[in-house]
């Protein structure tokens, strides 16, 4: 996490909420809160925000205490494709087996749909 990383509006709001908590617990008076919260609203980077909390214990904004947030990687394929793949494999296997086995495999898509429908509700 670099100090020159720019702040988001949500991170500024979190910082102001942390300062509000320090007012509620008596660590800051209203004048100090006003001064620090004004500086929070004009802070551009994490480096600008850090001195405002250097003399205060927790709570602190997560941007100053937590690890860097990484975006969640996108899935390479949709879960909705899994039943289609299962059906395709079932049909391919059904073509290669005897007639009796093929009709039994036709029930596989219905079973797959029921299984995945149940997982989505959980």
Image (tube, rainbow, N blue to C red):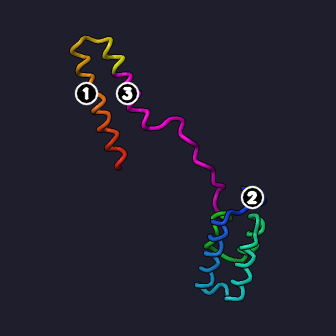
In the displayed structure image, the side of residue 49 where residue 14 appears, left or right = left
Q: Nearer the viewer, mark 2 or mark 3?
A: 3
Can you give x and y, in whole percent of width and height, for residue 45 in the image? 76, 64
Up the image or down, 60 lies above or below 84; here it is: below
Please tell me whether mark 3 sits on a helix, a strand or a loop. Answer: helix
Main secondary structure of the magenta stretch: loop
Q: Which residue is mark 1?
A: 107
- Tell me what residue is drawn at x 41 percent, y 32 percent: 82
- Tell me what residue is drawn at x 74 percent, y 82 percent: 35
Q: Which residue is mark 2?
A: 5
Tell which circle, 3 or 1, labels the residue nearer the N-terminal end.
3
Q: Which residue is mark 3?
A: 86
Please tell me whether mark 2 sits on a helix, a strand or a loop. Answer: loop
Tell which circle, 2 or 1, labels the residue nearer the N-terminal end.
2
CB within 8 Å, label 2 to label 1? no
Q: Can see residue 54?
A: no
**Magenta highlight on residue 82:** yes
CB within 8 Å, label 3 to label 1? no
- Tell me what residue is drawn at x 38 percent, y 23 percent: 88
Query: Disc 2 versus disc 1: distance between alpha carbons?
Result: 55 Å
Q: Tell me the magenta residue range.
A: 66-90
Q: Assess disc 2: are there few (<14), some (14-19) or many (≥20) residues with their C-alpha within 10 Å of its C-alpha.
A: few
Residue placed most toward the observer, 42 or 46? 42
Tell which circle, 2 or 3, labels the residue nearer the N-terminal end.
2
Please tell me whether mark 1 sits on a helix, a strand or a loop. Answer: loop
Q: Assess disc 3: are there few (<14), some (14-19) or many (≥20) residues with their C-alpha within 10 Å of its C-alpha.
A: some
In the displayed structure image, the side of residue 119 where residue 56 appears, left or right = right
- Tell me what residue is drawn at x 75 percent, y 69 percent: 43
């Amino acid at each position: 996490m670099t100090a020159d990383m720019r702040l988001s509006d949500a991170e500024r709001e979190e910082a102001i909420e942390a300062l509000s908590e320090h007012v509620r617990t008596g660590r800051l008076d209203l004048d100090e809160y006003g001064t620090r919260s004004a500086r929070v609203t004009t802070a551009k980077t994490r480096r600008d925000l850090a001195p405002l909390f250097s003399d205060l214990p927790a709570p602190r904004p997560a941007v100053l205490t937590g690890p860097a947030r990484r975006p969640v990687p996108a899935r390479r394929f949709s879960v909705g494709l899994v039943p289609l793949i299962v059906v395709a494999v079932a049909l391919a296997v059904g073509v290669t087996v005897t007639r009796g086995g093929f009709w039994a495999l036709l029930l596989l898509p219905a079973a797959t749909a029921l299984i995945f429908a149940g997982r989505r509700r959980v």
